[in-house]
Amino acid sequence: MVDEFMCAVRSRWPKVLVQFEDFSSDHAADVLNAYRLKQLCFNDDIQGTGATVLAGVLCACDHVQIPLKDQRIVIIGAGSAGLGVAATLLQGMVRVGMTTEEARDHFYLLDQFGLIGEGRKGLNSAQQFFSRKGDLADKTQLFEVIKHVKPTLLMGLSGAAGAFTQEAVEEMAKHTEHPIVFPLSNPTSVAECTAQQAYEWTKAKCVFASGSPFPPVVYNGVEYQISQCNNMFIFPGVGLAASVIQATRVTDGMLYSAAKALSRCLSADEVANGQVFPSVENIRDISLKVATAVCETAFEEGVAGFMPTISHGATLENYVASKMYYPSYHALVE
């Protein structure tokens, strides 16, 4: 059925961008991989989430002054979102000079049974790639993983409410000055922990972002603004860029550029407040920055089907802005 749909869409609208959304973990990566090199398509759960999280992690790395290549990363959730995030962060490490094998050694993925070890049966290819080989037993639980690994970054994409226990987060905080804690599941009812819990358990030392909206946290008389990791920071800009320059496909390089552009969108005040994502009130400006960066990379990588003519004195960003949709309407009835 999917193949028939993709063929029909390509035949009727050869330049259209197809966005895959909410495919099951069993099929999402396989569907994406089947089409991404031959048709303009994009999976928001895998690629959008991965790029958005990468942007937040890059900002968090700057805040704690530990580069991405030196982060020790524990991820709870080994479905399409968790694996997509792991793959995107790994690619980020490779882009700064690490080998794939060196980068992979920085990741510890857990599912509902615990750590994914190499002896686990029934793993898909991506889970097998990230399975641990020898240092910890299959199905080791979170607290023991944290105790052994001493992670600097803890992420949740599990949909399991309360998966980040007080014991585990406090153990993490013993070994790193500023633990990066990202419970990214949403809605709020399935968040791995709340913002209040993270700040209390780490004595406000954490760098925090969540997938669900949380109100500001007050700890010892100081108010902390909470960053929300939301794919809306990435996919509108990617879609706009793909449309404007008639991209033939969405590459990993384009997504990396989107993440880097997003990471540079925070204001000085937002950085000073400890945020790792900009305010959503600025989403149009953010999407324009992301789209422009994606266009530039598409030109560099030779996947742009159209090269716009830029007016004298104008910029590529000006051109992209002129193609944005503005939802303003003339009144039909006074």
Image (tube, grey):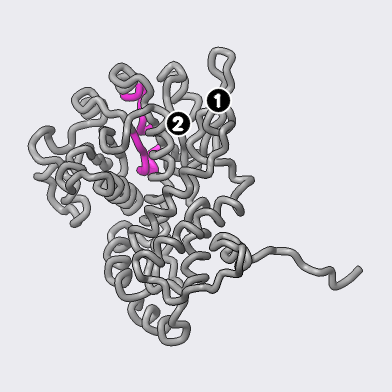
Q: Residue at x 55, y 25 (%)?
A: 224
Start-end of magenta stretch: 154-169
- In the rendered image, the residue lying farthest to the top is 220
Give the residue type that dot 2 points to. Answer: Phe
The answer to if 168 sits in the magenta stretch is: yes
- Outermost residue, bottom direction? 11
Cβ atoms at labels 1 and 2 below 8 Å apart: yes
Q: Which residue is mark 1?
A: 224
Q: Residue at x 28, y 66 (%)?
A: 33
179 sits left or right of 208 in the view? left
Residue at image point 34% right, 59% down: 24
**Quarter containing the N terminus:** bottom left
Secondary structure of residue under mark 2? strand
Q: Is 64 above or below relative to 3?
A: above
Q: Position of residue 303 (x, y in %)?
A: 37, 71
> In the picture shown, does residue 109 fall above or below 193?
below
Please state the horizontal and vertical placement of residue 250, each as a whole percent of the image: 38, 65
Dot 1: few (<14), some (14–19), or many (≥20) neighbours within 10 Å? Answer: some
Given residues 253 and 316, the one toward you in this image is 316
User: Which class describes the residues within 10 Å of circle 2: few (<14), some (14-19), or many (20+)?
Assistant: many
Image coordinates of residue 192 in percent, x first then y, are 40, 35
Image quarter of residue 172: top left
Whether residue 78 is visible = no
Q: CA distance from mark 1 to mark 2?
A: 10 Å
x 52%, y 36%: residue: 227
Q: Which residue is mark 2?
A: 208
Mark toward the start of the polypeptide (1 vs 2):
2
Task: State the mark number for residue 137.
Answer: none
